[in-house]
Amino acid sequence: MQKTTLPRAQQLAERAFANLERFLHIEAISGVVLLIAAIAALIWANSSAAATYEALWHTPITIGVGSLVFTQSLHFWINDGLMTIFFLVVGMEIRREIHEGALASFRQATLPMAAAIGGVAVPAMVYLGFGHAPSEQQGWAVPTATDIAFAVGVLALLGKSIPSNVRVFLLALAIIDDIIAVLIIAIFYSGGLDYSGFGIAAIGLMMVLGLQRIGVGSAYVYVVPGAITWVGILMTGAHPTLAGVVLGLMTPVTAMPMRERPLDAVTRFTQELLGRARSPEQNASELISPLKNLRVAQRELVPPVVRVQSGLHPWVAYGIMPVFALANAGVSLAGVDLSTQAPQWVMTAVVIALVLGKPLGIVSVSWLMVRIGLCTLPTGVNWNSITLIGLLAGIGFTMSIFIANLAFSDPASLGAAKLGVLSASIIAAALGLAWGAWRVRRG
């Protein structure tokens, strides 16, 4: 009985695992999970248990080796630690597209850059165009940011009806937007960057290049130099998740060189393994070497940028991004006071700048660059797609709230800015989904 039921159970387990793997690679479902986490955080932060929400994310977590001890809040480890892996995957996706996809030509690759600049400049001008006291005008950078995680999550809700190149364009634009935001913070809202950290980051990057040069294919070996790069960028005062982008862009897009073609090596090691396994005098220890060689050859069949990205995707989509949403979407509306004119002005300016200024800047600058012949639209991306990207870029959320905390010292203005960012992000997401659905029906 046992001999007949075990194979059946094994088949069911393998079938369940295959279905789970297919499920985890469905983009629309990952968007739903992200949305549920965000709604849960918002309800939690504005409920009677709001104190537990704040206490959880401020829990100190210590990582140390010997006398080297580093203590930060759980919120920090999520935003600056786990999200580095998200940005690593984003960097890899952009690297692939630069090599052989939507960003392969210079005129296609420069369009997201130009669009990002328009998406920063126009919202800032819209905000300042309202005109008010200098203390409120300090928030001009609040509507310039895009929350890449939530923008991509909302785009995922539209499923495979949206061409993959639209996602790539949004990712590239949002990455450049993030870099501009880092520069804005360093120049206008802080004491500048600590350049000593760049030396540490450079050491980490040189180690990565050295490992690639000698043909090291295992992703685990790159964890240490990657961590050194992360620490270096953190020391500069910039957002350490940029380390993920840089490392992703450095990931090889071709398989590591071998003495023979990977496919030939797989065939040879498979035949060797089968020959030893079928031998009447077969010894289990003799299978270790060909099995190890076969695993290496199979690994090298797939370029590192594809292999690592595919392996990390389910963890990012169903683990890191929902946790990020849960930790950051809980914007407390307690104490928001709109009874005076200044907070009203701040909230209105933020909403209009994000909801209208973002798409206006992105679409208009993109149109201008294509019109004068400096850029071209990527394959599968039309002006309806650019409009969709512009609307989703209005989801400023966590990055905009972060800048608001730096820009406003007055609690009333800060509360109004947060409410404006939250409102604008919800409106932008709704408009993006509506536009995307209309685009699909229209064909």
Image (cartoon, rainbow, N blue to C red):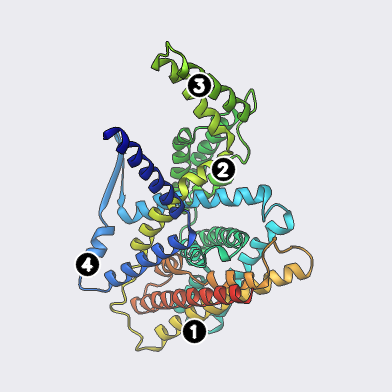
- Label 1, label 4: how many angstroms apart (C-alpha)? 35 Å
Judge by depth and name the residue closer to the eye, 254 or 235.
254
**Is label 1 or label 4 in front?**
4
Q: Amino acid at mark 4?
A: Ala
Residue 338 point in image, percent of width and height: 36, 86
Residue 129 point in image, percent of width and height: 56, 82
Does residue 138 appear to the left or right of 78 in the view shown? Answer: right
Q: Amino acid at mark 2?
A: Val
Give the structural element (helix, strand or loop) at label 1: loop
Residue beneath disc 3: 274
Judge by depth and name the residue closer to the eye, 330 or 60.
330
Residue beneath disc 4: 51
Q: For the residue carrying disc 1, how many other residues have a C-alpha within 10 Å: few (<14), some (14-19), or many (20+)?
A: some
Residue beneath disc 1: 132
Residue beneath disc 2: 305
Where does the C terminus fall, quadrant-wise?
bottom right
Residue at 56% across, 44% down: 306
